[in-house]
Image: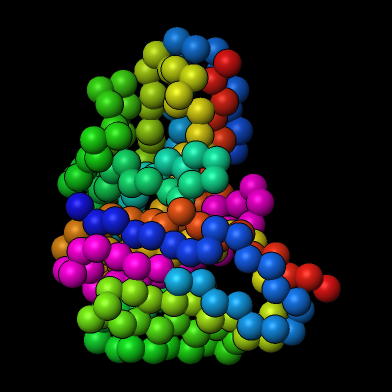
Amino acid sequence: GENVEQHPSTLSVQEGDSAVIKCTYSDSASNYFPWYKQELGKGPQLIIDIRSNVGEKKDQRIAVTLNKTAKHFSLHITETQPEDSAVYFCAASYFGNEKLTFGTGTRLTIIP
Amino acid sequence: DTGVSQNPRHKITKRGQNVTFRCDPISEHNRLYWYRQTLGQGPEFLTYFQNEAQLEKSRLLSDRFSAERPKGSFSTLEIQRTEQGDSAMYLCASSGASGGNEQFFGPGTRLTVL
């Protein structure tokens, strides 16, 4: 089955700086890669996703890049703000196999 | 609010008791998923419905666990003879056929087994 690894497990960034979280996956059939943000006591919130037919996707301060050859994808947050502090999870799946396989999470702390 | 809702939000039970959780998906979403999340880990897939049909079950779902979605709308997850190892956050998500595999999660039910 699919295995997703995520690094780093914790990340502290000065407010205004950029943050990068990286994930690798094992199943070359995977073609859908979402990122979720989870705040304390809440369910995961979908913040951005990418499909395998594109290499990069951007939404305001958030971007995701995908390298299918190397089987890794990354989340980039620019101009970080205190409200970006949360746990971020990457995940992978492929159409026809609907279950998401999640990474172990990155606790992002924005230092004011 | 038209998001995914889950009830109860918290459940404390004694070992050996049965518990049941409910999930109401986003209206007209035909797919519904259950995941389990333990402290410091990412969610782990348990089971998945398309309309009322349960299409896949994880090996994590022992015979003490059962899930239903009788009318293709809300779903229930029952755990029989709870064990301390069942303590976790149980998350429900839904997705619609037109939205690809975008899954939207509810707030979860936190289960504590004493």
Residue situated in front as seen by the camera: B102 or A64: A64
Residue A37 at x, y percent in the picture: 55, 64
Seen at 24% across and 56% down, the residue is A2
Seen at 18% across and 69% down, the residue is A28
Residue A65 at x, y percent in the picture: 40, 84
Residue A97 at x, y percent in the picture: 19, 59
Residue situated in front as seen by the camera: B81 or B96: B81
Question: What is the quadrant of the C terminus of chain B in the image?
Answer: top right
Seen at 45% across and 10% down, the residue is B16
The verdict on residue A36 being magenta is yes
Is residue B109 something one can see in this rendering?
A: no
Residue extending farthest to the right is A112
Seen at 48% across and 64% down, the residue is A7
The verdict on residue A29 being magenta is yes
Give above or below for A85 relative to A73.
Answer: above
Give above or below for B16 relative to A71.
Answer: above
Where is residue B75, by image quadrant? top left
Please give the range of residues in magenta.
A23-46
Residue extending farthest to the top is B16
Q: How is the image coloured?
A: rainbow
Where is residue A10, by image quadrant? bottom right
Is residue B40 something one can see in this rendering?
A: yes
In the image: residue B32, left or right of residue A13? left
Residue situated in front as seen by the camera: A55 or B34: A55
Question: What is the quadrant of the N terminus of chain B in the image?
Answer: bottom right
